[in-house]
Amino acid sequence: MTVQPTPTPLPPLPVTVISGYLGAGKTTLVNAMLAGRHGLRIAVLVNDFGSIAIDETLISGRDADVIALANGCMCCQVGGVLYDAIDRILTLRGRFDHLVIETSGVADPGKIAQIAVAEPDLDLSRTVVLVDAANFTACLRDPRLEDTLLRQVRAADLIFLTRTERVAAEALAELQMLLAAQAADAAMAPLEKGWADAWRILAAGPRSERGPAVGPLGFHFLPFESWSWRGRNPVDRDRLIGFARDASLHAYRLKGRLNLTDGGSIVLHKVGPELAVEETGKAFDLSELVAIGARPEFDPALLNAAWARVAGTGQRQPARPRPSRT
């Protein structure tokens, strides 16, 4: 009998989060990345295709949520919940070298970056925030916008300044000092003449390969660890939901597909306190559940004990430590 070699597991997919307030230039940057002659196969998650003006000659195929490009890149519309879109990319991750997530103009990139850190199959590379140099200071004076703008800047490890040609040298220097005070460890550069080469930020590699890096103003990524379970027996719906909502287990991220004792089958996602359950209408060959949390509060032994009350006879997988990112 011929023994088949064990498939080599795919390495985590590097992720770059691109953020910035409305009109800062995020879409221009994404377009530059997609059109660049870099040889990288990039998957891009965007909120709305309508803002991405992709050259029709580059498109090799499209459907309602996906635009495939002839250079091997792909643009994917989030459409609903972000982690659903991420899971869709991960099913194809052998086809891509890098994932880029373009946030909405009012999103907190730190929270989105944390999702990337908590996903075992992703490796956060960097968080890029674009700042509209011509309008940032005026927007910051608006008390309705101040918190959003500062959260974005504080989450950055790379800040690109756009529209700098519209700002006097003295005002630009003041803006740079303001940004440096909020994001002391972030690199900062103007982008006016660098759009074509902006893709080079993707070549920096994941944080785990670049060594420890302290984020702005003490922004630290937590040391994550994971726990997983696989089994063929269906589980009780109410006990499963109780497990997912049990704050004492400190599971920041949960994802799974499970058959239930009531005859249903579901896909379950949880990020922080937000829990989403989707009925599939089709049974799975195997039920699976993964939990991820930050040490030391997250304890796989506690999850084993709690899960035994849900599944009882399932085959639990050993906990897999996650590398620390500081």
Image (cartoon, helix red, strand yellow):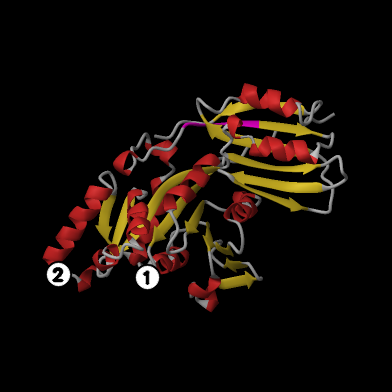
Q: Residue at x 46, y 45 (%)?
A: 124
User: Which secondary structure lies at badge 2?
Assistant: loop
- Residue type, label 1: Gly
Q: Residue at x 70, y 42 (%)?
A: 256
Q: Residue at x 49, y 73 (%)?
A: 51
Rendered position, 78 above or below 153:
below
Q: Residue at x 48, y 56 (%)?
A: 100
Which residue is outermost to the right?
263
Q: In this orientation, which residue lies closer to the viewer: 316 or 245?
A: 245
Q: Which residues are magenta?
A: 223-227
Q: Is residue 229 visible?
A: yes
Query: Splitting the image into 4 quarters, where does residue 108 fall?
Result: bottom left
Q: Quick one: label 1 or label 2, which is nearer the N terminus? A: 1
Q: Position of residue 326 (x, y in %)?
A: 39, 34
Q: Is residue 193 visible?
A: no
Q: In this orientation, which residue lies closer to the viewer: 86 or 31?
A: 86
